[in-house]
């Protein structure tokens, strides 16, 4: 088990006003203080135990906590109660300044869902060997501060990530007068003037990093080129921007490459021989690595009539990437592979990911396998894990496998149809019954794919069909992930869970108000289930509100993260869930593999004790690298599409309203998946107010407006390919919006009150 990490010598807060053996009803302030000072022990049962409340008093406590939640004093985060804006014990921080005494000050790199609450400040404690400084990103343990006059938290640095560079990333351009300029990728960064003797060989159109020099008294600040990243005219140039802007490690150190090249192929020693089991891989047609293989057969056990046995084999990455090795340190630093339209930045070198660990057709490969038995209703009866040597019987694409099942087998799938493919689909039919009974969240949000030309520019954007072959592999992988979490829990071994918390009460209330404008009700209470959201989605299916409601329901959901505390997976409606099926591209899965090896005695390359003690840190780190990858991937798509549309300024497009803010409307071009912005000042002569409840922008005089999900006509008026930004002009007229106008008048009153407050503040300033 992971050792409990103690970060502060300060004794945890004890309830005041009586001894622990003497029951009393605490005051609101005492409860709030306890929750503030004990964020890791703030569940309802723990609070009741702390104040020695008996059964009858616990009803009173439940009512008090609900009242505090309704008033916004506390919120429910997973299964704990916490103050809005409160931080967990382990968090990633950005150090932004020092106070007058030289103490480092930091803010959380990623805040939770409290957009209206400024991020709390953390004072970094002095350290004898502190390597952290202003501008660094660190992993830290944080604690409520003792001093009420200073920042609300103090922190102790656990790890300093790579130093943030002072350099500015941008493209080298030349003015008509012959001067060299750096046009920054990020709008917030300065444009630099670069003297010819500071170019370091860079040419016009190159993506470069430049270090700002001393600022001129007049004109632009000077800069010096520190690195020539590459030419934007070359292939795979656009993803380079995101890679450097987000500081994604993309070049493997030589020590890592040497270790990968010197790795020896795993043997049968210590493994079961599964080379005759006809496991097959089903992947995208262009997949270069294959980390999962599947097989299914009918269960012959008389006690499980109509049941099936499903086998999932996963590449045994732990056999090659040992804890503490150079390969392991680099994989943890990367956290995951990053997938761009024009390239992949892998977590592991190609020798490991595309060769030794790839379950290639006809080649013996080591694997971690799970054999699962399901009854005729799709409920898992039991499962077992095995460390094996396997040989893939076939490599198929999703389209190839689906075509065979649909009656169009080819030369490769024909011989496999009756013996392998049909049993797989029969097993999927049974597992689908279990999925239907489980009722996970069923959002319908199509995923777009970008196809590039040979020169790296956009050829076309399309929505690939969602095949049963995709769903089959997805459901098999989900069940394997559940089995991994269950095995580790039963063995009382540490787990890095994939957790997805239920929507916060604040988001539930916001969704409830919005649905009320469409005359759709949502039950109250903290125990909402995915099935209740599915009922709403079914009600609006094939109506004008379908896209809108899907979007709003999606926005109400919490973000999935990695954690060592089991909080369940709301979206999948599962009590326990861990990522096990993609260790080639996710470090979390490698950690789960190692835990299983240790728990089941499957070898000496399992999880070390020192790793167990650091699992909470690892979970926080890989959650951050996952968000980094998502942001980089999204920005690259935006830049590619903006470049694709750069010559179409002035053209009209049909767009869907994808978001709103006080400053204007965000729109998306469905055909391209590109996002742009319509400033509120360009909407017309009316005075528009953003109604958050209805997700609408409404004219104050006319009552007409625009709503999230509306299809509108827009004109492209400005485009900045380097930033991936586009500005549009709204051509569609505002329309009468469905539902109640109560929230609109509430928004208008709020706006009027804000204006009055600003007016009073302005008057005070003049006085």
Image (spheres, helix red, strand yellow):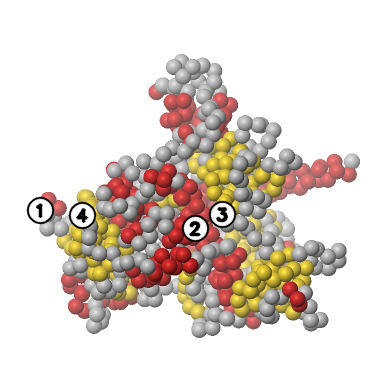
Q: Position of residue 525 (x, y in %)?
A: 45, 40
Disc number lying in front (1 or 3): 3
Q: Earlier in the sequence, mark 1 or mark 3?
A: 3
Residue highlighted by disc 1 = 302
User: Which residue has dot 2 on it?
Assistant: 333
Please name whichever residue, 172 or 35, is drawn nearer the observer in this view of the structure: 172
Spatial CA distance of label 2 from label 1 is 50 Å
Name the front one of labels 4 and 3: 3
Residue marked by disc 3 = 161
* Foreground tag (2 vs 4): 2
CA–CA distance between discs 4 and 3?
44 Å
Q: Is residue 707 placed above or below 454 in the rendered structure? A: above
Q: Which mark is residue 373?
A: 4
- Nearer-the-camera pick, 72 or 146: 146
Above or below 342: residue 37: above
Spatial CA span between label 3 and label 2: 9 Å
Q: Is residue 417 above or below residue 610?
A: below
In the image, which disc is placed on residue 477?
none
At a point 43% along the width and 61% down the height, the residue shown is 327
Which one is in front in this view, the residue at disc 2 or the one at disc 1? 2
Q: Nearer the viewer, mark 1 or mark 4?
A: 4
* Local SS, label 1: helix
The residue at 52%/40% (across/down) is 89
Q: Residues within 10 Å of mark 4 (few under 14, many from 20)?
A: many
Counting residues from the N terminus, which is met first, the one under dot 4 or under dot 3?
A: 3
Residue 712 in view, yes or no: no
Q: Which structural element holds mark 3?
A: loop
Gap between marks 1 and 3, in whole Å? Answer: 57 Å
**Could you tell me which secondary element the residue under label 2 belongs to?**
helix
């Amino acid at each position: 088990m992971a050792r409990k990490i103690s970060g502060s010598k300060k004794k945890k807060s004890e309830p005041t006003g009586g001894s622990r053996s003497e029951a009393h009803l605490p005051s609101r302030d005492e409860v709030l203080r306890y929750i503030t000072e004990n964020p890791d022990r703030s569940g309802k049962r723990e609070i009741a135990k702390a104040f020695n409340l008996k059964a009858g008093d616990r009803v009173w406590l439940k009512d008090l906590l609900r009242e505090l939640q309704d008033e916004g004093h506390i919120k429910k985060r997973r299964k704990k109660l916490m103050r809005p804006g409160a931080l967990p014990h382990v968090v990633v921080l950005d150090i932004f300044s020092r106070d007058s005494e030289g103490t480092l000050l930091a803010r959380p790199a990623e805040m939770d869902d409290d957009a209206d609450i400024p991020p709390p400040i953390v004072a970094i404690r002095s350290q004898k060997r502190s390597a952290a400084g202003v501008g660094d990103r660190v992993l830290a343990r944080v604690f409520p501060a003792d001093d009420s006059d200073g920042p609300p938290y103090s922190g102790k640095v656990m790890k300093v990530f790579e130093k943030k560079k002072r350099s500015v990333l941008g493209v080298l351009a030349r003015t008509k007068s012959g001067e060299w300029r750096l046009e920054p990728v990020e709008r917030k960064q300065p444009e630099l003037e670069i003297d010819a003797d500071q170019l370091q060989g860079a040419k016009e159109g190159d993506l470069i990093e430049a270090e700002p020099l001393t600022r001129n008294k007049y004109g632009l600040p000077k800069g010096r080129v520190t690195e020539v990243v590459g030419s934007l005219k070359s292939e795979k140039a656009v993803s380079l921007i995101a890679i450097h802007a987000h500081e994604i490690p993309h070049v493997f150190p030589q020590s890592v490459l040497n270790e990968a090249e010197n790795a020896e192929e795993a043997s049968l020693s210590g493994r079961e021989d599964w080379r005759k089991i006809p496991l097959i891989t089903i992947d995208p047609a262009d997949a270069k690595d294959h980390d999962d293989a599947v097989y299914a057969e009918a269960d012959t056990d008389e006690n499980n009539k109509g049941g099936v046995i499903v086998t999932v084999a996963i590449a045994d990455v732990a056999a090659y990437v040992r804890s503490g090795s150079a390969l392991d340190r680099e994989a943890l630093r990367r956290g995951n592979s990053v997938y761009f339209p024009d390239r992949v930045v892998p977590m592991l070198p190609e020798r490991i990911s595309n060769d030794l660990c790839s379950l290639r057709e006809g080649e013996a490969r080591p694997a971690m396998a799970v054999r699962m038995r399901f009854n005729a209703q799709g409920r898992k009866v039991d499962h077992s894990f095995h460390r094996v040597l396997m040989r893939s019987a076939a490599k198929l694409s999703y389209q190839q496998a689906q075509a065979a099942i649909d009656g169009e087998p080819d030369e490769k799938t024909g011989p496999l149809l009756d013996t392998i493919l049909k049993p797989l689909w029969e097993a999927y039919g049974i597992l689908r019954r279990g999925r239907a009974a489980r009722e996970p969240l069923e959002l319908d949000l199509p995923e777009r794919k970008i196809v590039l030309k040979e020169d790296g520019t956009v050829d076309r954007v399309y929505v690939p069909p969602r095949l049963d072959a995709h769903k089959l592999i997805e459901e098999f992988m989900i069940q394997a992930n559940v089995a991994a979490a269950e095995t580790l829990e039963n063995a009382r071994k540490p787990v890095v869970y994939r957790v997805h918390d239920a929507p916060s009460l604040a988001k539930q209330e916001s969704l409830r108000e919005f649905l009320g404008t469409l005359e759709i009700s949502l039950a109250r209470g903290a125990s909402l289930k995915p099935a209740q959201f599915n009922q709403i989605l079914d009600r609006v299916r094939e109506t004008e509100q379908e896209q809108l409601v899907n979007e709003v329901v999606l926005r109400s959901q919490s973000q999935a993260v990695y954690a060592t505390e089991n909080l369940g997976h709301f979206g999948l409606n599962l009590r326990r869930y861990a990522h096990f099926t993609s260790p080639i591209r996710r470090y979390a899965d490698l950690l789960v593999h190692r835990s299983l090896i240790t728990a089941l005695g499957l070898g000496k390359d399992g999880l070390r004790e020192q790793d167990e003690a650091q699992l909470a840190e690892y979970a926080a780190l890989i959650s951050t690298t996952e968000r980094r990858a998502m942001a980089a991937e999204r920005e690259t798509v935006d830049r590619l599409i903006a470049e694709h549309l750069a010559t179409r300024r002035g053209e009209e497009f049909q767009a869907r309203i994808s978001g709103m803010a006080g400053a204007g409307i965000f729109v998306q071009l469905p055909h391209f998946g590109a996002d742009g912005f319509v400033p509120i000042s360009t909407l017309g002569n009316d005075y528009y107010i953003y109604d958050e409840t209805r997700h609408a922008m409404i004219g104050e005089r006319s009552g007409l407006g625009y709503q999230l999900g509306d299809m509108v006509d827009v004109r492209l008026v400005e485009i900045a390919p380097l930033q991936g930004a586009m500005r549009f002009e709204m051509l569609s007229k505002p329309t009468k919006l469905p539902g109640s106008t109560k929230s609109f008048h509430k928004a208008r009153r709020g706006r009027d009150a804000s204006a009055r407050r600003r007016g009073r503040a302005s008057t005070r300033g003049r006085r």
